[in-house]
Image (tube, grey):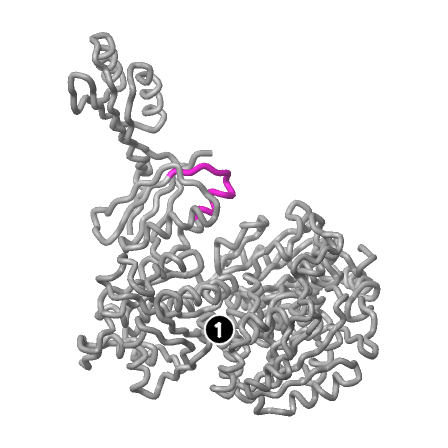
């Protein structure tokens, strides 16, 4: 099962390498990883996605929590949550038909065109990972593409806070 | 406020952390620190011959005393040589602080002379680490290192200090941070009360109970609590390799060690138990054998301070995260309050256990032939060692057959008496660890039980023993082979002894010991063993190297059958349980 795990940790040098090291050391895989300082600059917020059964997920949460720099860990997939991923796509399209199709698709998926040349479009799309995958499926046949994805960000729904 | 250089701050911080002894080896990046050490008399430095030994010695010191051990090494090769020692301590949860010199800050990343990314190299084998980048931060980093190393589940902490921030010409005010408070690190202490109640209820209602105790009990100084609880319950207890001595080995309630080379009675009792109280243990693969076949009928109560140890390999029915001492104390008071007269009778269980003991026990029904003439059985060496030292010595060991024989036949009655590398299985640990123990207890008998393979991995430390007058006794079970490797090759590779035999290439250990200024003895006759062992331990102020020629064909039994349940054991070369 896919898991989205949020981690609040000290914004110290080396903290990220301990998280990444933990995953390789224990044989867990990371599908996506995002990290940035929070509103409190002394803290970093990580969101990572991984796949594993309940036992593995429990171990991952416990192992992350065991890192000395970690303040809080939450497996978002245990409750209801909001997830978002940002994707930038560059796609080649020089004839009228393919340019029109791209514009139709980006409208259907409620994305934006952020740059354009005679031969390419650069698009921006926000959503959960499934939606981004679906969009890629819809436009891949049009031209050759370059994709960059931010990795998943997640936050719990409701009043629950992951703060210091 | 007193102004000090970075080097002086390191030494003052060690002093204020209560550190009396530092094991180490100097080198370029650490020289400012060494100069500061030289100019004071509170913190004593002990020079070793290899950085691995510095860490093992600090580790042995810590295991014997319960205090944090300290090692100091230089950058690059000094740091990487320390790695095996750090990994050894990490696997056995031993509190250490290892201070490594680093190249100057502006040279980090330049592939400078003797530069290694120590933080990166050590990352998977430390509890935590610090790269200090300002002179002003040294004291706080060292204070935090000792706090982290010694609290919660203990472990080694590395403090990497670039040379330029220890420069004697740059001085800053020094203050020792008294209390450490870290918002991201608050180890659990007390176990959940409701869980403890549930556990005690299960425990007193058990018909076939067993207590499975591990190294955590020793680390947390919870041996008295454990002993009192077990005696109050009158239940059988077994121990892991790391937990030996937490409960008296000579007590009839003790079934011996469990696991791969555990006794039949301990492994069979685990397999048939209806309730297992695991305390300070982690269901290691050397204990459980095949996980699928592990203790099919048992309700498992698991007490450990580290949540990641709980339900990692075996699901606990009643997990309790807390320190062994606090949880055991609470259990004891609940057990005393419980009305057990109406509860289950464990006498049929004891009857069964005693039958196992009589039939298969290594203490009641010896599994090996007797020594005779030139054929000295290694098991008998441990028995003689036990008798000569009245069961009172500190015993360190290396890794292999001798380690298992020592664990099986030296019945440890006290915690911290048995010092070995259980988790990592580090050959070369025994001699430097013995130095650490002897430093802490100068009057005590300290025996390093080893083999001719292991001892050669840190044999250079015989010179350290001379320099610092550490009169340890080396009991070398010499079978001219890597005995445990050879045993596996006998059992699993049709006796093909690939690279496990020394083929007349061994040194003359007596002459070698003498070359270092010590006493050497060679024992080749069983009749000589007792008197020479007596003589060895009568030489109080000398290092004695006893090279004892033992039966090269001997195997360690019992031994779990791979892929089987706990109780599936080879009892000797021909007989399976």
Please indicate whether residue B94 sits to the left or right of residue B396 in the image.
left
The spot of residue B176 in percent (x, y) is: 27, 76
Q: Callout 1: residue from which chain?
A: B
Q: Nearer the viewer, residue B125 or B311?
A: B125
Q: Nearer the viewer, residue B482 or A100?
A: B482
Q: Residue B239, relative to residue B205: is it above or below?
A: below
Please rate how many residues cluster around mark 1, counting C-alpha atoms within 10 Å: few if below 14, some from 14 to 19, many from 20: many
The spot of residue A109 in percent (x, y) is: 27, 19
Q: Which residue shows up at 79% across the image and 81% down it?
A: B526
Q: Main secondary structure of the magenta part?
A: helix
Q: Is residue A6 magenta?
A: no
Q: Which residue shows up at 41% across the image and 36% down it?
A: A77
Does residue A21 show up?
yes
The picture quadrant where one finds residue B394 is bottom right
The spot of residue B416 in percent (x, y) is: 56, 75
* Residue on which the image places disc 1: B53
Q: Residue furthest front?
A: B504
Q: Which residue shows up at 68% across the image and 51% down it?
A: B295
Q: Is residue A51 magenta?
A: yes
Q: Nearer the viewer, residue B411 or B543?
A: B543
Q: Residue B189, relative to residue A27: is it above or below?
A: below
The picture quadrant where one finds residue B491 is bottom right
Please indicate whether residue A21 sits to the left or right of residue B226 in the image.
left
Q: Which residues are magenta?
A: A49-61
Q: Nearer the viewer, residue B333 or B51?
A: B51
Q: Residue B563, relative to residue A105: is it above or below?
A: below
Q: Which residue shows up at 34% across the image and 53% down it?
A: A71
Mark 1 element type: helix
The picture quadrant where one finds residue B409 is bottom right
Does residue B207 show up?
no
């Amino acid at each position: 099962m896919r898991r989205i795990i949020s981690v609040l940790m000290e914004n110290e040098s080396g903290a990220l390498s301990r998280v990444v090291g933990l995953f390789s050391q224990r044989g867990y895989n990371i599908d996506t990883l995002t990290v940035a300082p929070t509103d409190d600059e002394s803290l970093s917020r990580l969101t990572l996605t991984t796949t594993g059964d309940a036992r593995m997920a429990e171990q991952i949460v416990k192992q992350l929590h065991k890192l000395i720099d970690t303040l809080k860990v939450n497996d978002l997939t245990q409750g209801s949550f909001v997830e978002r991923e940002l994707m930038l796509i560059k796609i080649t399209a020089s004839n009228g038909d393919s340019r029109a199709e791209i514009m139709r698709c980006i409208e259907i998926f409620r994305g934006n065109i952020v740059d354009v040349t005679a031969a390419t479009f650069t698009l921006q799309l926000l959503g959960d990972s499934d939606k981004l995958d679906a969009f890629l499926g819809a436009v891949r046949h049009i031209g050759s593409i370059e994709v960059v994805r931010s990795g998943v960000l997640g936050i719990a729904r409701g009043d629950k806070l992951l703060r210091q | 406020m007193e102004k000090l250089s970075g080097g002086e701050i390191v030494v003052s911080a060690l002093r204020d952390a209560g550190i009396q002894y530092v094991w180490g080896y100097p080198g370029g990046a650490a020289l400012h620190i060494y100069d500061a050490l030289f100019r004071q008399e509170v913190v004593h430095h002990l020079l070793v011959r290899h950085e691995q030994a510095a860490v093992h010695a600090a580790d042995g010191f810590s295991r014997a005393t319960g205090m944090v051990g300290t090692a100091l090494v230089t950058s690059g090769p000094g740091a990487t040589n320390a790695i095996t020692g750090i990994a050894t301590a990490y696997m056995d949860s031993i509190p250490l602080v290892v201070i490594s010199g680093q190249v100057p800050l502006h040279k980090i990343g330049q592939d400078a002379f003797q530069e290694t990314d120590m933080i990166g190299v050590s990352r998977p084998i430390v509890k935590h680490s610090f790269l200090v980048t300002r002179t002003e931060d040294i004291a706080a980093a060292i204070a935090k290192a000792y706090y982290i190393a010694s609290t919660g589940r203990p472990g080694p902490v590395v403090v990497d200090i670039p040379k330029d921030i220890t420069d004697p010409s740059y001085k800053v005010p020094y203050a020792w941070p008294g209390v450490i408070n870290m918002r991201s690190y608050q180890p659990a202490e007390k176990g959940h009360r409701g869980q403890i109640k549930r556990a005690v209820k299960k425990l007193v209602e058990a018909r076939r109970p067993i207590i499975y105790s591990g190294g955590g009990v020793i680390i947390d100084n919870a041996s008295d609590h454990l002993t009192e609880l077990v005696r109050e319950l009158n239940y059988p207890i077994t121990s892991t390799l790391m937990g030996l001595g937490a409960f008296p080995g000579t007590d009839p309630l003790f079934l011996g060690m469990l696991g791969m080379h555990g006794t039949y009675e301990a492994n069979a009792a685990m397999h048939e138990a209806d309730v297992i109280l695991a305390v300070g243990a982690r269901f290691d693969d050397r204990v459980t054998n095949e996980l699928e076949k592990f203790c099919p009928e048992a309700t498992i109560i698991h007490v450990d301070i580290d949540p990641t140890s709980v339900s990692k390999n075996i699901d606990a029915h009643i997990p309790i995260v807390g320190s062994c001492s606090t949880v055991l104390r609470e259990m004891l008071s609940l057990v005393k309050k419980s009305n057990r007269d109406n509860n289950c009778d464990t006498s049929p269980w004891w009857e069964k256990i005693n039958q196992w003991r009589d039939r298969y026990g290594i203490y009641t029904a010896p599994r090996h032939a007797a020594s005779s003439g030139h054929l000295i059985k290694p098991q008998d060496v441990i028995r003689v060692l036990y008798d000569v030292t009245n069961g009172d010595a500190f015993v360190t060991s290396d890794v292999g057959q001798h380690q298992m024989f020592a664990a099986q036949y030296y019945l440890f009655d006290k915690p911290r008496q048995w010092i070995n590398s259980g988790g990592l299985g580090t050959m070369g640990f025994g001699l430097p660890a013995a130095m650490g123990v002897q430093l802490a207890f100068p009057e005590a008998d300290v025996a390093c039980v080893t083999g001719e393979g292991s001892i050669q991995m840190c044999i250079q430390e015989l010179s350290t023993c001379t320099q610092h007058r550490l009169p340890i006794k080396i009991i070398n079970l010499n079978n001219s082979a890597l005995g445990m490797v050879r045993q596996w090759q006998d059992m699993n590779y049709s006796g093909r002894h690939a690279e496990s035999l020394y083929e007349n290439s061994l040194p003359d250990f007596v002459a070698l010991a003498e070359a270092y200024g010590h006493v050497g003895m060679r024992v080749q006759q069983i009749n000589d063993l007792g008197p020479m062992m007596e003589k060895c331990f009568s030489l109080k102020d000398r290092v004695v190297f006893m090279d004892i020629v033992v039966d090269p064909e001997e195997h360690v039994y019992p031994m779990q059958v791979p892929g089987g349940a706990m109780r599936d054991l080879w009892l000797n070369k021909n007989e399976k349980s």
